[in-house]
Amino acid sequence: MKDLLRIKSLISSDIEALLNQQVKKEALSSSIYLAMASWCNRNGYDFSSEYFFKQADEERHHQLKFYKYILDMGGNAVSPEVTGIKQEFNSFREVFEEALDQEISVTNSIKNIYARCMKEQDFITMEFLNWFLKEQREEEYKARRALELFEVIGEEGTGRWQIDKHVGQIKYDSEA
Amino acid sequence: MIATTELTLWTDVFSTKTGAVYQCDAERCWYVDFAGKVARFDHRNFLKLRKAVYAIDIEEKLLNTTTDPDVEIIFICACDHCYVLSLAQIINLKELLEGTFVMLELNHIIHDRLFSNSL
């Protein structure tokens, strides 16, 4: 008896479900960043707004990467429903705290898929995920660095204006 | 009834008292013999059937005290077949599909091992 499930799809249905979950997570991240960009723009933090617009674009790009991978491997990619996006924030700092929380949750989720791939010996998906693991280093670094600016510059006086200016310059260029 | 000529091309995957699933390698599909008919499912539709059946909350239906009949219509988009099943039949179909997918998984493991051992 032929292994028809394997002939049709390289990834198992469990991995497919996890990858679809990740598609949704990336779509959610993109929408959250878009809401943050809007809040920053409305409150006069133009550089931060620009930073979040870029982040939203990146998350959308990640989402499509997962989406196309599922399809290329013979799976069924599901366009996700994204609802319940928080539109208002209590402070400038809270925006960045939530951005870091979001990135940590994405890292954990990718680690979880990786662990499942290891269990199934799905080396192909593991190799695909390697790019995302490296990307999360950058994403978490940037989010953490932005919060660090609140500590080193301080919010008093023109502090928030300074922080906003520096957020736009955050870069991660580690060769490691 | 299933013709004998057809049966020779089909491999038994799993069967219960109430139904059976056969695989046809040549057509790359499965035949589900259940509820008085033999229905052909390709890969996509077979997975959709599984999803539809697994999504039915049997416990909720058992506890439901409304007077609605316990009938579930399983309709799969872009598939020719449709099932109208009673609660007992849903339980039976779920059992049949669960067994089938365990067997398919087992077949996958065997293929995997045979291939890796032949290297």
Image (tube, coloured by chain):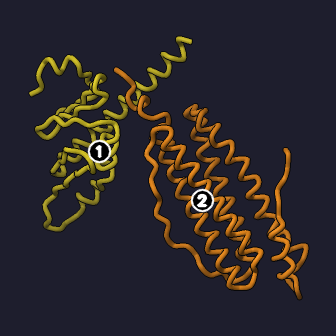
Which residue is the extreme one toward the left?
B1
Name the residue rendered at 28%, 48% in the picture: B53
Picture disc at residue B49: 1
Label 2 and label 1 in one chain: no
For mark 1, name the chain: B
For mark 2, name the chain: A
| Secondary element at image label 2 | helix
Q: Nearer the viewer, residue B77 or B95?
A: B77
Q: Nearer the viewer, residue B22 or A23?
A: A23
Above-or-below relation of B98 to A77: above
Name the residue rendered at 44%, 21% in the picture: B110
Above-or-below relation of B29 to A152: above
Name the residue rendered at 61%, 52% in the picture: A109
Above-or-below relation of A84 to A134: below
Task: Find the distance from the CA under tag 2 to the CA under tag 1.
Answer: 31 Å
**Chain A color in figure:** orange
Q: Which chain is yellow?
A: B
* Quadrant assignment, res B69: bottom left
Going by the numbered disc 2, the residue's amino acid type is: Arg
| Secondary element at image label 1 | helix
Q: Position of residue B37 (x, y in %)?
A: 13, 37
Q: Nearer the viewer, residue A169 or B32?
A: A169
Left or right side of A17 for B52:
left
Q: Which residue is mark 2?
A: A60
Name the residue rendered at 22%, 47% in the picture: B90
Q: Position of residue B79 (x, y in %)?
A: 24, 45
Above-or-below relation of A79 to A16: below
The C terminus of chain A - image quarter: top right
Going by the numbered disc 1, the residue's amino acid type is: Leu
Q: Residues at badges 2 and 1 in contact (C-beta under 8 Å)?
A: no
Q: Position of residue B96 (x, y in %)?
A: 26, 37
